[in-house]
Image: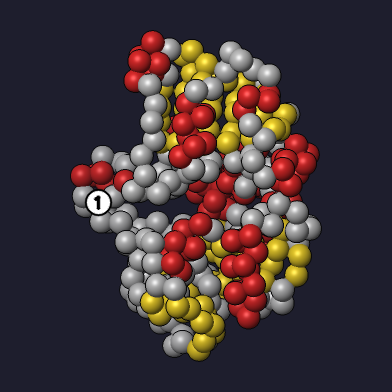
Amino acid sequence: MRAVLVTAPGRYEVTEVPDPAPGPGELIVEVSSCGLCGTDMHILGGELPSAAYPLVPGHELTGRVAALGPGVTGPRPGTRVAVDPNLPCGACHYCRIGRGNLCDNYSAVGVTRDGGFAELVAVPAHSAYVLPENLSDAAAGLVEPLSCAVHGLNRLPRRPGEHYLVYGAGTMGLMMAAVVRGAGAASVSMVDPNADRLPFARSFAADAVAGTAGELGRPQGFEVVIDATGVIAAIEDGLGHVRKGGTFLQFGVADPARTASFSPFAVYNREIDIIGSMAVHNSFRPAIDLLVAGLDLDPLVSHVHGLDGFEEAVGVFRAGTGRKIHISPAAGTRAAGGTGA
């Protein structure tokens, strides 16, 4: 089969690799699409310590079951599925107390074992979630990132009628804005220094948009501030815009070597809650249910590339000129809903 193979940090190619064979408890998925995200970029650059090379990356994947391994009775071949890439060990302290997303023995499809930037991929059968046939291809490929947003939502106090501020109008920020809006936010504001992103953010999920939080005209701050950037300057600024008694959610992935400065006195004196949200936790099926119920995220997919267009897709991602980019092994390169940021 053909796949994107990362042979070493900074070195990758589209090449022929052996077809995967399903082991006990596994099945083979014929990949329909797989989203490109920041984690994949870290893998390409050798910036993710847990990545094992050589590696076929890609963890936001959907497709159809092609074959079953020993001991597997379903889903049956031909069934449409989305794959939860996270593989908690089930034995460490955190797994045993029901916090598998914090597993001490982290493993994941597309990170520590071959993933979805390929025609075929082997995954544990329990990681495959059946999808309805009427769900769009774009939506099917967004289940994994949406499940991250759902977990982020579940980490919040979720008090209806509160005002939210989201830093970052990229795909995850937009998805987070859509999810909190549906959960009863009184308003959702978004800030992003890239002015080209703001018109889409305003039309998609935001009541107000600006280049900086100071332009939004809420000197009292916001009950909930969400960082979806991982950028230290944005995090530090966001902490300063949390209203008394409010909550700050660290949702974006920051450079693990960086630290942010904040006022401990302000956290104490203003009773600010600072919480984090890591990956997926009991949120994959709820994400599918949201899409089935009508949450329309299709406009977030701006590009679809075939495997031969992978390098071009990486360029679009790095330039910040698209939203979610999907790699579809059977497809040619095309725009999906426009290329605006």
In the image, taking residue 154 as reference, residue 175 lies left or right, namely right
Q: How is the image coloured?
A: secondary structure
Residue 10 appears in view:
yes
**Residue drawn at 57 percent across, 72 percent down:** 31
Tell me the SS state at disc 1: loop
Residue 279: percent from left, percent from top: 43, 47
Image point 21% across, 50% down: which residue?
Answer: 92
Q: Quadrant of residue 23?
A: bottom left
Please state the horizontal and vertical placement of residue 66, each as a whole percent of the image. 53, 77
Q: Residues within 10 Å of mark 1 (few under 14, many from 20)?
A: some
Observer-nearest of 4 and 45: 45
In-front residue for pair 156/69: 156
Q: Horizontal placement of 43 versus 160: left or right?
A: left
Classify 22 as above or below 126.
Answer: below
Residue 94: give x, y in percent of width and height.
Answer: 25, 44
The amino acid beneath tag 1 is Asp
Q: How many marks?
A: 1
Asked whether residue 285 appears in the rendered view, the answer is no
In the picture as drawn, the residue positioned furthest to the top comes out as: 269
Q: Residue at x 71, y 33 (%)?
A: 209
Q: Quadrant of residue 232?
A: top left
Q: Looking at the image, which residue is at 40% across and 16% down? A: 266
**Residue that carries the numbered disc 1 in the rendered image:** 104
Picture layout, residue 285 above or below residue 7: above
Q: Viewed as shown, does residue 265 lie left or right of 63?
A: left
